[in-house]
Amino acid sequence: MENACSGGYNENIPMKKLARILAALSAIAGILVLIRSPKGRAGGYLWLPKLLAGAWAPFLAIAGAVGALLGLLRGDLTSMLTGAFGAFAATRHTVRVTRRRHDPFEAAFGRDWEQRIPADLWMRLSRPYELIQPSKPFGPHQQNVDIGTKHPLLCDLWLPPFEAQRSGLGLIFLHGTWWQAVDKDFLIRPLFQRLVNQGHVVMEVAYSLAPAATIYIMLDEVKQSIAWMKEHAAHLGVNPERIALMGGSVGGGHLALMAAYTPNFPEFQPKDVKADTSVRTVISMYGVTDMTAYFQEYGVLNPGQPEISSQITEEMRPSVHDKTLMDRLLTRLRFFPAYRYSNMPGGAALLIDLLGGTLEEIPHAYERFSPITHAGAHCPPTLQIFGDQDFAIEVSHGRRLHRALQAAGVESVYIEFPDTVHAFDQYFGVSRRVAPAAQMATNDIEQFLAIMV
């Protein structure tokens, strides 16, 4: 009898441990998705844990439920309570993020907006949300195509699979990360897979980065990209009147909006570009819209940001290090081609070098390079997507631009995901196809572009 009892007790130990592990993982994730991310550096410290907790919330909800059930079967009150809490919190997050929102599209395009999407293209759109979004095949892919005029400007071209019906729409994509880091083809392929299978052509541009390049050079390169795609539209199978701009994060989103809102403006038009640089539409993923406001916000992330240029010390400026293997790797991969040992990403002098002075010294430049300054009836239809707990940029950027566009009569769609942090659409591996917010944003982008065809 004693051996039997002992054997039964030993059999319970692994099951009890499993219940507690599953319940604890789910509860930790539940706490992360429930607590509100603070602004500034504190939000940056919480950013990655909250990003992963939100991405894997559906599976962590399942883990919590299993932990609670095992706890119930084994009489473990701790597992029951922590698992139930984790399952509730993760499920709540998933439901809030994946709730279908048609109001933003109806407000911009009317109640019959779905009828504006061609029937064959509608059938190819992704489902808004699946537990694991299926992968799609790629079409032809051309890397490092040089489209520069005065200096090399590389891009990657992603073409529709041969069996996909061409839509005629060409998308120019600009990556993010504070105007100063990361190369093309960084954590973005899952989105491109969806878009090329709908018949769109995608061109991702490796625009020049700060501090070697200023905002003037970057915007010139975006305009060059538009002119190049229009010039080669017939070869690419693109309608030159159906070119879209899309940018990610603080830098890429800002550049996309600036280029879209200043078509053929003499002060922003490169001297060697004679082509029309207007576009059909623009998409910004949590991009800066007001550089004047952002100078103050960036100062919160980097408290040492000077008020006047004379306060800049040599230690504040980024410099390229070439001492270690890691230094050379970061430089070669353009992950941080210009960086210092601390204050990454960014640096106290980033915006000052980018625009040529501080806000106090050149307020007109900060206003001039703010997309919201140029919001008017001439602007193309615009889609903005934000997470409401973005530590890197205030969501007021998107909200204020949206109101300005609406007042000007522009078709504007603004979407804000609850309980969602910065870069919620960029992950390594399968996480991108699991994350509820990333999947929903992909569907919003697909629908918006389909209306533009």
Image (spheres, rainbow, N blue to C red):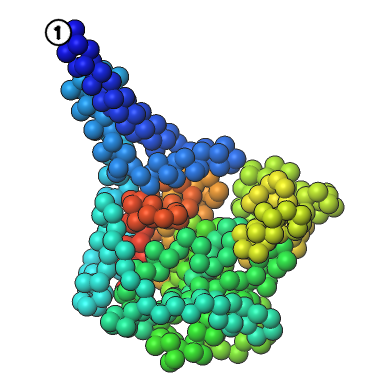
Where in the figure is residue 382, as x and y percent of width and height? Answer: 43, 67
Q: Residue at x 61, y 52 (%)?
A: 293
Position of the C terminus, as image quadrant, is: bottom left
Nearest to the observer: residue 308 or residue 315:
315
Where in the figure is residue 300, as x and y percent of width and height? Answer: 64, 43
Nearest to the observer: residue 337 or residue 37:
337
> Does 205 appear above or below 228?
above
Extreme-left residue of the structure: 1
> Does 37 appear above or below 72?
below
Q: Residue at x 68, y 71 (%)?
A: 216
Where in the figure is residue 15, as x and y percent of width and height? Answer: 26, 25
Q: Residue at x 30, y 28 (%)?
A: 18
Q: Residue at x 51, y 62 (%)?
A: 186
**Amino acid type, callout 1:** Met
For this view, does 81 lie left or right of residue 386?
left
Position of the N terminus, as image quadrant, is: top left
Residue 80 visible in image:
no
> Does 164 appear above or below 398?
below
Nearest to the observer: residue 279 or residue 126:
126
For this view, does 394 lie left or right of residue 7?
right
Residue 162 visible in image:
yes
Q: Quadrant of residue 283?
A: bottom left
For this view, does 187 lie left or right of residue 23?
right
- SS for callout 1: loop
- The residue carrying pointer 1 sits among few (fewer than 14), some (14 to 19) or many (20 or more) residues within 10 Å by Cα, namely few
Extreme-top residue of the structure: 2
> Does 302 appear above or below 192?
above
Q: How many marks?
A: 1
